[in-house]
Image (cartoon, grey):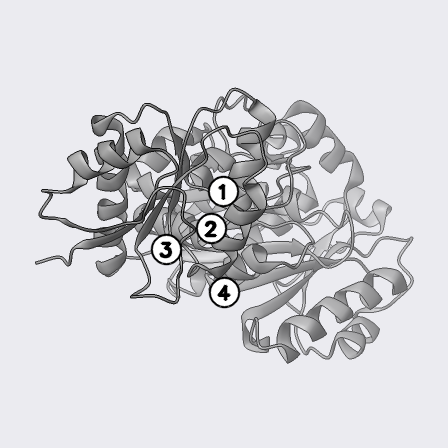
Amino acid sequence: MHSKLHILAAPASTDTANALRQCLGGASDFMTTLLTTGSTPDLDDGPAPDVVLYELPALAGDDLPVLQALLARLDAGTPVFVIGQVASPSLMRILMQMGVRDVLREPLEPSELLAALAGVQDERRLAATPVARCATVIALCNGHGSSGASLLAVNVGAALARRHGARVALIDFDLQFGKLAHYLDLKPKTHVLDALRDAHRLDPVFLKALMCEHEAGVQVLAAPPGLSPMEASAAAVRKLVDTAAMEHDVVLLDLPRVMNDWTLEALAASDRLLLVTQNTLGALRDTRRLMNYLTTSGEVPAERIEVVSNRAMSRLGSTTVDQMKRALGITRMHRIRNDYAAALAAGDQGLPLWRAAPQSVLGEDCERLALHLWRQRHPEAAAPRRRAPRWLDRLRGLEPQPTPAS
């Protein structure tokens, strides 16, 4: 037996007040507080609402400061529906960025209103149901700019699917410069913002419809095609991650190097953070700063962080493995050998490394990292057979058989 939905309605016109009264007055599932026409909601008077209906008569922007102040006082995640006509895309974007769930057109249509409220009820029921989460959620983030986290996410995900038969989801949370779709030559028609904007509809079926499947066996939820504000609802991000974790074995989150409320929520929803860095002093400084913030603030426990040294053994590196460990205060570190030609070929062709450069040591190390991650849930997993060291490896100065972590 579910509780009634408490609705706080603030009409600005008599017609809308009458429409709300007629539509909601006799509904047994709703408990409606209908304010007098033109009055401002007082959140201190009575229990906190489950949903707010707020009418902006002209939608010219004059009442936006009042609406913004109301949104700031509501509990996080409380759906707010604006009633009015929105002719300007820019105004709609402003409302969405403020946190408005949707805009209901006037004159108010009862079917549209009831459908919106039914979505809120479904969301409440889903939130009250324990999430059957079966996946390991792994976040990847660059500790230093352009350290290669996206390329690793794609190829570790492809190795998990190809070598271990894992059901893998890749979610690109880099809202401005996401590259996962590019690295797999995908042309998605939907993207991660579609999921976040309609978080109340999120379930495994809806999420699958938003994702692209690649022949490597991974499901990809791409970043938007153009630059988007780095703004999202932390609650929507959590729901997206939890929904992906219901139908996959491994969920890989490609996160931007930005610390705000929703990226921290994504980290909180993750079982492990792979912090990707390089063996230079500048990269170590930035990585150490980020690790200090995450661990001392309590956002991510130190035991959930694993450091990945990408482009390791590069002749351009300025620090040794031991120096890196001491600088970062760690005892183990994954090393991914440098193979710039293979990385460039894979990125330019939109292919995973096993297709673009089958003999690449970079692809081999991605498979070893994938095995390490898979064995955390499946200790019995067998390692892929190692190929013999090649003279070309020695010529390049690359180590032929690295350990997954050292």
Image height of 88 relative to 295, above or below = above
Q: Position of residue 190 (x, y in %)?
A: 47, 27
Which disc is residue 170 wearing?
A: 1
Q: Nearer the viewer, mark 2 or mark 4?
A: 2
Point 42% across, 44% down: residue: 168
Q: Is residue 272 left or right of residue 23?
A: right
Q: CA distance from mark 2 to mark 3?
A: 16 Å
Q: Quadrant of residue 10?
A: top left
User: Secondary structure under badge 4?
Assistant: helix
Q: Nearer the viewer, mark 2 or mark 1?
A: 2
Which disc is residue 268 wearing?
A: 4
- For marks 4 and 1, the one nearer the N-term is 1
Q: Nearer the viewer, mark 2 or mark 3?
A: 2
Q: Position of residue 97 (x, y in %)?
A: 56, 41
Image height of 141 relative to 54, above or below = below
Point 46% across, 35% down: residue: 56
- For marks 2 and 1, the one nearer the N-term is 1
Q: Which residue is mark 2?
A: 237
Q: Are marks 2 and 3 in contact (CB under 8 Å)?
A: no
* Amino acid type assigned to the residue bearing label 3 in the image: Ala
* Amino acid type assigned to the residue bearing label 4 in the image: Ala
- For marks 3 and 1, the one nearer the N-term is 3
Q: Which residue is mark 3?
A: 135
Q: CA distance from mark 2 to mark 4?
A: 11 Å
Q: CA distance from mark 4 to mark 1?
A: 17 Å
